[in-house]
Image (cartoon, helix red, strand yellow):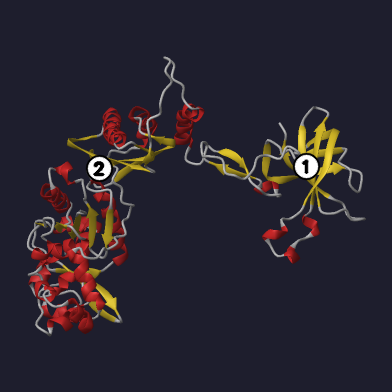
């Protein structure tokens, strides 16, 4: 069964303001500070957007008019709210929480969900995990409340309306939700007020009514929220990163920062995750390593494999050249590793002699991996023929070891140059008219006298890709394969049909060697 952890910060906007204005917050320490609130304009009216604990204790609340709040509490200090900064901070908090779970979903404006299914044992259980997360956030100036349950709806309700950190055992959600108010079902205020007028003030009393009667009186939304909270209906969470069960985590008693320690940790956590992949008979094509610093920042490294693999030593070696990019700051306290592109990888049967043979692609894969991870993704590829008359479209890039698509091979009757320019380059020519190849051409300041020539090969626009009336005679090309006196071979063309009294334009499109 799934396990969802909900984290909620009642004073999220206030905590973010204090972090953004840390100098002002430090100046206030040591002396009593006035109650504080953030203000925003709503439909032309200034209202309280967020209040701190002191202001709330004095009776101020979110949505109250700022003028009324000032009248009640004259010493109230205010500043402008910044919802955009709060949203950005919530996204950063999701990235920070990756040290606890690889699947984190924001719950704007002041909460988030963590899918902790199958990973709580890394902390010795859900309760120590929740306690660790709450303590770390509190130390960073973000007080939160948290709850874990089998559904996102139940975890949301317990985090906001139950007392303390609540861990709902499997199947106990209904029992824990029963005494909570209807607002815990994430109902719109109007719907909750309508139900409350009938005396149904708790979730338990609402659940006792027949479902048909609830739907008939209040619509399907209330029943839907109730079913989501109790696990009768599924709820989709939009995770900031796709949920990934292939996840490993290492925490350290003392922060590390020395490059040798980073390399050792990278090897250890890679071996840990690859051992799981081997037991499951799987391999991965991408591994992402995260170094979580004491200040909350995460240093990410990623490597890719041309073929699915799980050889820990080889994967760790690919990470080593990237470790010099890691800035440990004041130290790294947690390291995480996730595997992506996971697919079945069955063991390969070896030959009976003492010299096992590997498939050709398996032999070249380590080289491709080293080049691709050193030069960057997309820097290593192979050309593949593509069914197109246009030379610019006749070749496409494919991953080095990807299976060939069924597009046909090269046409030996129409050879193409090994080097095709991204854009044809203009040349000056001396050529008989109307259809003969050039006798002499000048390219990049050098003259080339033609000794041999083949052609022409006429290519026109691919009319089926656009309306027929848009086809232009001026786009026709007559290609020639020519060889100069020095033995260089070139692929050049004349643009457009021959016209009396008009000089032809010639272009060089590629080299044959």
Q: Residue furthest top?
A: 354
Q: Nearer the viewer, residue 175 or 80?
A: 175
Q: Which residue is depicted at the point 23% across and 77% down?
A: 47
User: Most extreme residue toward the front, as rendered?
Assistant: 352
Q: Please tell me which residue lies in front, 15 or 410.
A: 410
Pick whichever, 185 or 208, lies toward us: 208
> Can you see residue 424?
yes
How many labels sit on residues? 2
Q: In terms of sequence position, does the residue under pointer 2 or pointer 1 come before the other?
A: 2
Residue 78 appears anywhere in the view: no
Q: Quadrant of residue 286?
A: top left
Crowding near the residue tagged with mark 1, few <14, some 14–19, many ≥20 C-alpha atoms within 10 Å: many
Residue to which mark 2 is pinned: 293
In this view, 63 is above or below 465? below
Tell me if 163 is positioned left or right of 497 in this view: left
Q: Residue, x 88% and y 38% (percent of image)?
A: 439
Determine whether the residue tagged by mark 1 lies in a helix, strand or loop.
strand
Does 48 appear above or below 456? Answer: below
| Residue 24 in picture, x, y percent from top left | 20, 59
Q: Is residue 258 above or below residue 100?
A: above
The quarter of the displayed image where residue 489 is located: top right
Tell whether 424 sits left or right of 286: right
Quarter of the figure with residue 69: bottom left
Horizontal side of residue 163 vs 248, given as left or right: left
Tell me the number on the disc at residue 492: 1
Name the spot of residue 67 as percent of width and height, x first.
19, 81
Q: Nearer the viewer, mark 2 or mark 1?
A: 1
Instruction: Give the structural element (helix, strand or loop) at label 2.
Output: strand
How far apart are labels 2 and 1 at the CA level?
Answer: 57 Å
Where is the C terminus found, in terms of image quarters? top right
């Amino acid at each position: 069964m799934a396990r969802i952890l909900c984290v909620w910060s009642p004073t999220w906007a206030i905590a973010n303001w204090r972090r953004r204005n840390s100098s002002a917050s430090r100046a206030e320490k040591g002396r009593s500070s006035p109650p504080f609130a953030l203000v925003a304009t709503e439909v032309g009216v200034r209202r309280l957007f967020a209040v701190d604990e002191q202001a709330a204790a004095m009776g101020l609340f979110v949505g109250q008019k700022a003028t009324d709040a000032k009248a009640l509490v004259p010493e109230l200090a205010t500043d402008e709210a910044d919802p955009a900064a709060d949203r950005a901070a919530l996204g950063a908090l999701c990235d920070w929480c990756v040290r606890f779970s690889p699947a984190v979903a924001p719950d704007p404006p002041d909460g988030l969900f963590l899918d902790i299914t199958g990973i709580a044992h890394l902390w010795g259980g859900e309760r120590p995990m929740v306690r660790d997360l709450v303590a770390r956030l509190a130390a960073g100036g973000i007080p939160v409340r948290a709850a874990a349950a089998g559904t996102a709806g139940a975890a949301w309700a317990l985090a906001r309306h139950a007392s303390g950190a609540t861990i709902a055992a499997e199947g106990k959600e209904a029992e824990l939700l029963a005494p909570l108010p209807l607002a815990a079902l994430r109902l719109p205020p109007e719907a909750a007020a309508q139900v409350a007028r009938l005396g149904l003030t708790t979730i338990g009393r609402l659940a006792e009514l027949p479902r048909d009667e609830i739907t008939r009186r209040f619509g399907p939304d209330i029943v839907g929220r109730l079913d989501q909270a109790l696990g009768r209906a599924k709820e989709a969470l939009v995770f900031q990163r796709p949920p990934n069960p292939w996840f490993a985590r290492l925490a350290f008693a003392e922060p590390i920062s020395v490059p040798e320690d980073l390399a050792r940790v990278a090897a250890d956590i890679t071996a840990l995750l690859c051992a799981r992949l081997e037991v499951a008979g799987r391999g991965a094509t991408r591994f992402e390593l995260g170094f979580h610093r004491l200040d909350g920042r995460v240093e990410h490294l990623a490597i890719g494999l041309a073929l699915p693999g799980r050889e820990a030593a080889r994967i760790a070696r690919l990470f080593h050249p990237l470790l010099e990019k890691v800035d440990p700051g004041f130290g790294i306290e947690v390291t995480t590793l996730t595997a992506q592109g996971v697919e079945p990888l069955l063991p390969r049967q070896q030959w009976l002699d003492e010299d096992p043979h590997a498939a050709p692609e398996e032999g070249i894969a380590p080289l491709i991996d080293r080049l691709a991870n050193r030069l960057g993704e997309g820097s290593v590829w192979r050309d593949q023929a593509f069914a197109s008359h246009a030379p610019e479209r006749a070749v496409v890039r494919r991953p080095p070891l990807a299976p060939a698509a069924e597009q046909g091979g090269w046409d030996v009757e129409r050879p193409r140059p090994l080097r095709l320019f991204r854009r044809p380059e203009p040349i000056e020519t001396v050529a008989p008219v109307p259809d003969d190849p050039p006798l002499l051409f000048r390219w990049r300041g050098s003259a080339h006298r033609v000794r041999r020539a083949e052609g022409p090969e006429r290519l026109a626009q691919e009319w089926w890709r656009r309306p027929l009336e848009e086809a232009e005679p001026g786009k026709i090309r007559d290609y020639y394969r020519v060889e100069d006196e020095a033995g260089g071979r070139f692929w050049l063309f004349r643009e457009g049909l021959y016209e009396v009294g008009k000089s032809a334009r010639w272009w060089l499109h590629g080299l044959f060697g």
